[in-house]
Image (cartoon, coloured by chain):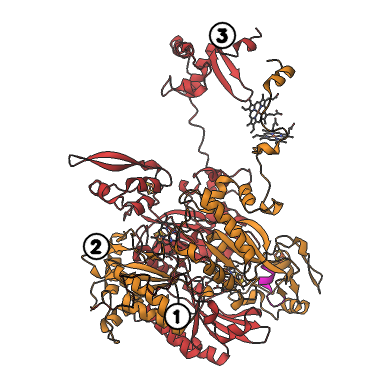
Amino acid sequence: MAFISSGYNPAKPMEGRISDIGPRKYDSFFPEVIAKNFGKWLYHEILEPGVLMHVAESGDKVYTVRCGGARTMTTVHIREICEIADKYCGGHVRWTTRSNVEFMVTDLETLKALKADLASRKFAGGSYKFPIGGTGAGVTNIIHTQGWLHCHTPATDASGPVKSLMDTVFSDFQNHRLPAPVRISLACCLNMCGAVHVSDIGIVGIHRKPPMIDQEWVDQLCEIPLAVAACPVAAVRPTKEDFNGKKINSVAIKQERCMYCGNCYTMCPALPISDGEGDGVIIMVGGKISNRISRPKFSKVVVSYIENEPPRWPTLCATVKRILDVYAENAHKYERLGDWAERIGWEKFFELTDLEFTPQLIDDFREQAYFSWRQSTQFKFSELAAEAYKGAEAHAEAANAGVTEEDKATVYNWLVEKTNKPGAKTKFYFNQFLELFPGASPRKVKNVLTALVDDEKVAYWSSGSTTMYGLKGAGKQGATEEGK
Amino acid sequence: MAKHATPLLDQLESGPWPSFVSDIKQLAESRAKNAQGLDYQIPTDAPEDLLGVMELSYEDKETHWKHGGIVGVFGYGGGVIGRYCDQPEKFPGVAHFHTVRVAQPSGKFYSTEYLRGICDIWDLRGSGLTNMHGSTGDMVLIGTQTPQLEEIFYELTHKMDVDLGGSGSNLRTPAACMGMSRCEYACYNTQLACYQLTQDYQDELHRPAFPYKFKFKFDGCPNGCVASMARSDFSVIGTWKDDIKIDQDAVKEYVAGNFAPNAGAHSGRDWGKFDLQKEVIDLCPTHCMSWDGSKLSIDTKNCVRCMHCINTMPRALHVGDDRGASILVGAKAPILDGAQMGSLLVPFIPAEEPFDEIKSVIEKIWDWWMEEGKNRERVGETIKRLSFQKLLEVTELPAIPQHVIAPRTNPYILFKEEEVPGGWTRDIAAYRQRHLR
Ligand code: HEM
Ligand code: HEM
Ligand code: HEM
Ligand code: HEM
Ligand code: SF4
Ligand code: SF4
Ligand code: SF4
Ligand code: SF4
């Protein structure tokens, strides 16, 4: 290979440099019919799945054939698209937000020939190159990220699961049988480079093991303050370690705090996170972006883990297919998946889809968690609800345990010791007494305190909202309270 | 004969959906054949090695790519993402395999002449592999080596008249729906707004000075085809103030079953005869429509412009003529404190060239966020930390009920000292005159 210069001179990078010119202006690429009728479209109709007709005020019509495709495509494939666009579409073509390819023509004759041509093209391996579909109340192309093809933090692949899923739901790409559009997205890690969290069905790769610490490399590869700062939950801290008899700078990770996001690995390659048996995907459903009928909403996690099963992710595909089919069977016309689940109730959603409700599906992340619990007596019964309560066998015998003089002395002596320290607190919360009786039932400890109150050695103190315990008569407000 | 056996990936060649594996194989074959006689500037067998490294990932279920690094073009802080393989000896063709983001035209219309020009550069100087397009919107060229970056940039700017997109803590490549180019619902020219602002903010796009990334997206109507409300810090969504235009004759055609409801979107199944009452009137979220058997009426004051009736009867109903946009601010992905969607900031703003009104809002937000935002804090998080009221203050907007779904449920109102008569400095001696201890 001989280096071919573009004309760029590395010695003088600014010479003849063009920068800050942005994208090409969109209208320089318009087909004639689009340029002519820009902003003057009257209505549209989906003639059949994947084929749209837009009618302009002028009476002009443009027919669009929408084709699915892998968003990872090669120049060979793009050149084939160009060849088709030259032949039928006057040298113009467009891509949709969801990586579909659209060919536009202005007469029915050409439309027919174009459709036949597109449908006939197949890859050597047998798959379609240009399947027509992706419109209306069906499934369109899956938005996705890079995965094992090109990223450093993925917990799953992207192109492979997407290919497998689209094969599984292919008939819905070419049909309008669903109650409303279903948008599927996939992100290969928590960073969610796509808008997976607002999809009818979102698939997200998750790690489940905290990063490993490669002590041999950490000091050499990492700027430790950056790795520490990268962690969103402050699980990483700097530390010194002995490694092969040498003191090295390193990090320690509080494993139980880690949310496996991989941000520290991005900053520090000596903290690898990927793990073949730990990694996998979750499924989120019921999000929507459109403001139609109901407000936009986030997707909810309904499957807390599915292992990676390359090359075809059969469990993932079967689960998505089941959700789709149950939705199709039960939802009303125009009802998006999330609107349907909300109307029937999520408990019903789990019953109908037969998905397992695992403890991980209850939110426990910060304040927002509370708002997803049920502050109501309204729920629908299912077998699970009817049988959730398992009986009264665990009524505590310790509750009625007797109080000994020794118990009372333990509390009293402790209170005297604490209270007599100069400048000390005189009032104590109940839970502090629990520490004096490790392993004992709280109700037993309460009985000890009650006995001391009855003995007039201990008194309650109350703010009106909070009750504490202290030695009778102790404390700065004691005088007022005793009426002295 | 393929360089690496890929029995697992080969299983992704069957089935109807276009196979990326078959596509990469045809690229590998084409490069091996080299009909054009190109002097490939990166290893000819890069696509083969890419399949090889992916097959390895399929075996051990772990990625073999390493973190990024300092690669880029002179003077730009973004647009290139460094990528290295962690098995360089086995797969030398992809040992260095960087990404170049190329700014896409709004609405993603292309001429074949332009596409071929890009392909020519990319065949010579890169792997021939792309994403059409990346999730942000750019055309993404996957796989080249460091010495080629300046050459690619030079050819893109000189031959193709196009620039790189954004990455890193800067303005990311803005994106728009197809808008007026082919959609009757577009309430403003999304493509022009996107193009104009991208041009006006080139410096912010190429030279990062923000706490973190910032994204604009432009949807022409509340249907939200580029998902701006979910994916952009600053989301501009078309809307209108006056009546939905009603063609009563066309309504009757729908009622009579002569026009397909929802433009034919439900044709795959027999949902029964179109029922205007059940499918439109009753589903209107605010119940502001009525139908007396011959005339459809909409109480515009109670319409929230959800698009349902228009989507369902596109030949009879059209968006109003007094058009502009709503601005929603602060969407972000879940990391860390949970996902956020854009929150309504400006209910209505003119959206006409040169878009000065929209730009004034953006710039006020930037001035505030660049000063107050913490590192790696999206503006949505800054708003949460410092309050929505603060956002109103810096954007000089009044608080109105439209800003909330409901007023607050807690009474913990933090009044400012100047809002309370007499301020916070009080006289304890005077108090003791009124109250004994
Ligand atoms: C009848 C109602 C609707 C019509 C006429 C309509 C029209 C369109 C048009 C013209 C496009 C192409 C725009 C582009 O690719 O930039 C599009 C794409 C899209 N629409 Fe809609 N839309 C409707 C309803 C919806 C709804 C309810 C949603 C979801 C909430 C939605 C989400 C999308 C998305 C995600 C895309 C990108 C699709 C792709 O790239 O393949 N649309 N829609
Ligand atoms: C340290 C803080 C608090 C103190 C010292 C306090 C004190 C009191 C007192 C003395 C009463 C009895 C009033 C009476 O019956 O004469 C009371 C009642 C009550 N407090 Fe508080 N309280 C506190 C915090 C709260 C908070 C934070 C809430 C609610 C979030 C609350 C809710 C109530 C309610 C609902 C009642 C009953 C009202 C009634 O019976 O009419 N309190 N509180
Ligand atoms: C610390 C957090 C993050 C890291 C380390 C990260 C890293 C990356 C990397 C390395 C890529 C390039 C993948 C490749 O082409 O090889 C990427 C792509 C991308 N990122 Fe992120 N990312 C992060 C957070 C996010 C978030 C929160 C969002 C969205 C709000 C986002 C949106 C994107 C998008 C849209 C792409 C293009 C993806 C594609 O088209 O495949 N990223 N990110
Ligand atoms: C704006 C603030 C509030 C107002 C105006 C309010 C008003 C009332 C009223 C009118 C009642 C009925 C009293 C009755 O039946 O005689 C009541 C009862 C009650 N409120 Fe509130 N409340 C407020 C805040 C709270 C808060 C913050 C809490 C607790 C977190 C609370 C807890 C209760 C409880 C538990 C009852 C039932 C009390 C009983 O029946 O004895 N309230 N409240
Ligand atoms: S979602 Fe995560 S793994 Fe996937 S491309 Fe984005 S940062 Fe990489
Ligand atoms: S993976 Fe994420 S949460 Fe875990 S230690 Fe690293 S940065 Fe922190
Ligand atoms: S967002 Fe609205 S205006 Fe834009 S393409 Fe979608 S339906 Fe049309
Ligand atoms: S746009 Fe929505 S709110 Fe307005 S009249 Fe139509 S259905 Fe009702």
Q: Which chain is mark 1 on?
A: A
Q: Is residue B27 visible?
A: yes
**Start-end of magenta stretch:** B307-316
Q: Which mark is residue B87?
A: 2
Q: Check disc 3 and give the amino acid type.
A: Glu
Residue contact between numbered discs 1 and 3, judged by CB atoms under 8 Å: no
Circle 1 is placed at which residue position? A130
Q: Secondary structure at mark 2?
A: loop
Q: Is residue A126 visible?
A: no
Q: Is residue B15 left or right of residue B213?
A: left
Q: Secondary structure at mark 3?
A: loop
Q: Which mark is residue A456?
A: 3
Colour used to depict chain A in the structure image: red
Of residues B73 and A308, the one drawn nearer to the viewer in this rendering: B73
Q: Check disc 2 and give the amino acid type.
A: Gln
| Front position among marks 2 and 1 | 2
- Tell me, by letter, which chain the rendering colours orange: B
Residue occupying the point 56% across, 47% down:
B384
